[in-house]
Image: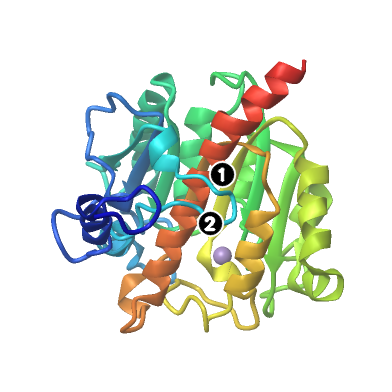
Amino acid sequence: MEFAKGLTEEEMNEYSLKYRYWSGIPTFLRAPHRPNMEDTEIGLIGFPYSGGNPIERMQHHGPRAVRNRSCAYQRAHRFLQINPFDTMKISDLGDVPLPNILNPDRSAEDAEKYFRKVHEKGIIPITVGGDHSITTPILRAIAGKNSKQKGPIGMIHFDAHADSWGPTAGTANHAGAAFFIGAEEGLIDPKRTIQIGFHGSVATLEQEQWSQSMYTVTTMADIEEKGIDWLAKEVHRVIGDGPTYLSFDLDVLDLAYAPGVADPEVNGMTTREVFSLLNKLRGLDIVGADIACFCPPLDNEAQITALLCSELMLHFVAHIADYRKTRQPLAAAAR
Ligand SMILES: [Mn+2]
């Protein structure tokens, strides 16, 4: 018997099974677990680490909580009309090994070594943290002159905060440093970097000065005034065509949409604004992405933040699949 066009009852049952997030062994987006990194184009990676944040330290629980909930998110992307699982080889590679977890500098080195392996295999990493210090070793491995990119890459950074600060609390590899180190070490191109959604009060009026002098910065006030269409155009203008990383700190969202975040600020973006923007970012060459600052003990009973992470992961893999399987061949054919 056929239900939806071309779907048999057996196939419908298979889809229904995929929605049961509580059934089976949890992996990111119910992707096959391939810790050997074989047969993989997009690698979903857990980075269970909170040693870079001096204020809140429960973010190492993030990957497990996202695996539990995202197990129901092996789905198709409604807006892009693509099922990334049909067009790309997507695997859960497991967690970044962190034998020296109590030492932030050695942990950054351990993580960099791991992401170098991922990069050498030609795998695009989508990483779930973890505090925002996770971005630094990822960038050191996949960007800059020693990487396959042979130079700095573009950066789309969603955050309430600038995270462009020098060494503090005993280490350079802390949760607020990735977007300082990224430019200092030649990993990201300041001209192709946009920071999105700064909001809330600030510790000092100079807090965002370094970012303002280096990058294109858009605050929540800019978004309120000019809207999401403007913001999408601004992202395309700044990023252009080259390889680009997307780093998503969940605190860019208002607490109403993402209660389970470390270091929250009030009056942030809505989920509608975030996903509306993502839908307008078609055609970018995303070579890696991360989701940072999920703090599961602060999430609510509906696991709203874990759901949000799941949907974000799906959007990231769909954008990558859309670009690699649709846009990139089209662009090549036009040349
Ligand atoms: Mn932040």
Q: Is residue 220 left or right of residue 325?
A: right
Asked whether the viewer can see residue 110, the reply is yes
Residue 121 in picture, x, y percent from top left: 38, 20
Residue 206 in picture, x, y percent from top left: 77, 66
Q: In terms of image quadrants, where is residue 266? A: bottom right
Q: Is residue 283 left or right of residue 216?
A: left
Q: Residue furthest left?
A: 24
Question: In which quadrant is the C terminus drawn?
Answer: top right
Numbered mark located on residue 78 in the image: 2
Which amino acid is tagged 1? His
Is residue 233 shown above or below 108?
A: below
Residue depicted at x 41% and y 26%: 116
Task: Give neighbour class at mark 1: few <14, some 14-19, many 20+ (Cα, 10 Å).
Answer: many
**Circle 1 sits on which residue?**
319
Which amino acid is tagged 2? Arg
Q: In terms of image quadrants, where is residue 237? A: top right
Residue depicted at x 60% and y 22%: 149
